[in-house]
Image: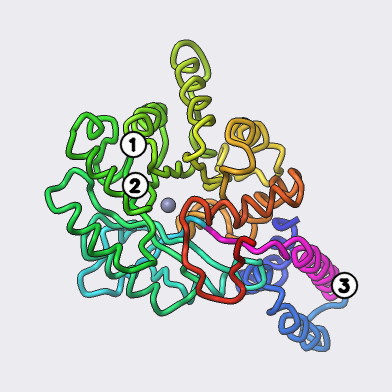
Amino acid sequence: MASFQQTALSDQFGNSGAEKLNADRSSERQLPEFLSNLSSLETSDTIASMNRRIFLGVAAVIAGKAMSAQTSSSIPIIDTHIHLFDPRRPQGIPWPPKDDAILYRPALPERYRKLTEGLGVVGAIEVECSPWLEDNQWVLDVAAKDPIIVGTVGDLEPGKPDFRKQLERFHRNPLFRGIRYGNLWGRNLTEELAKPKFISGLKAVAEADLELDTANPDAALIAAVVRLTDRVPNLRVVIDHLPQFNPPTQGKARAEYEANLRELGKRPQVYVKISEVLRRVNGRVPQDVNFYRPRLDEIWDTFGENRLMYGSDWPNSDHIETYPQELTLVREYVLGKGRAAAEKVFWKNSIAAYRWIRRAISQPQLA
Ligand SMILES: [Zn+2]
């Protein structure tokens, strides 16, 4: 339906029409404004009556969609995976690269707020996207100014000599909820786990009641998380982007992956993000939830409704699909598991995993 709406509008009004629709689709609050623009367009002689009928039909569909979105979005959403950065800073940014035409512009709470308006998103956890030590502080400073950010997962290396000192420093700010380590910044969790200093660093994270996010799963990382939770069983671990990972399909590799995942499924301190769900297949992004269902079911059946959390991976997700479109698909899948389960995935489990800080009345609390 979205592609039909977009096509219909771009055909008649050019790209700006499609952009306008995209903006409005993300927001029920903007809808009346859209509809009033629509009526002024309607009275204009520049539009043929047939075009008007199509346009109004599209508007009715949008209005209907917005209403149904409002009904289901009465479940508040904590988005557990967004990134913040600002390429205009004098020191620049390590990511995204300048040649990334989609991502290389400020990703700040204000833009996120506008983008998610009317979608039920009441808070977000920022996840590091920079290995520069002082960027932990930069994110905390940005987050301090906007209560939509309920926590941040920073970047510190547990094997480094000054790790404990830095952990203490940032942990003084209650928005600092954990660190991320895994397949990025040239790091290797499997290798680090062999080093006593790294393990004692992770123990310090657990003792501080903070969590560890892993980055970009593959079979080796899943195996490493089993060993990590053997060594530091009281550390809460959040595996990100599992839906995006293509597990081995056969042989010993498949058997090992399945055994490791099953083992993690038994460990209540291990959480998994339902993030990076949508993917491009042969140049297009399937919009039917059934395309993604087998992979999501495998994760759901392994970890269950108490251990899964929604994350958008915004703005990285813009490479694949618009925020509202991604959320709509994930919500369709999760709501299929019942309302109680959806409440857990969209906010309750994020409190258990992150112990994030409530900063606005709209942000729900466990009874
Ligand atoms: Zn990401």
The residue identified by callout 1 is: 232
Residue range corresponding to the magenta coloring? 51-79
Task: Indicate yes or no whether the magenta region holds residue 69.
Answer: yes
Foreground: disc 3 or disc 2: 2
In the image: residue 143, left or right of residue 48: left
Q: Percent from the top left, x then y, of residue 160? A: 15, 47
What label does residue 206 carry, if any?
2
The residue identified by callout 3 is: 53
Secondary element at tag 1:
loop
Q: CA distance from mark 3 to mark 2?
A: 60 Å
In the image, is residue 280 above or below residue 103? above
Q: Are the residues flagged by discs 1 and 3 in contact, CB closer than 8 Å?
A: no
Q: Is residue 102 visible?
A: no
Q: Residue furthest top?
A: 251
Q: Are the residues flagged by discs 2 and 1 in contact, CB closer than 8 Å?
A: yes
Q: Are the residues flagged by discs 3 and 2 in contact, CB closer than 8 Å?
A: no
Task: Indicate yes or no whether the magenta region holds residue 71.
Answer: yes
How many residues crowd around disc 1 within 10 Å: few (fewer than 14), some, or many (20 or more)? some
Q: What colour scheme has been applied to the protein in the rendered image?
A: rainbow
Q: Residue at x 18, y 43 (%)?
A: 159
Q: Residue at x 39, y 69 (%)?
A: 105
Picture quarter containing residue 289?
top right
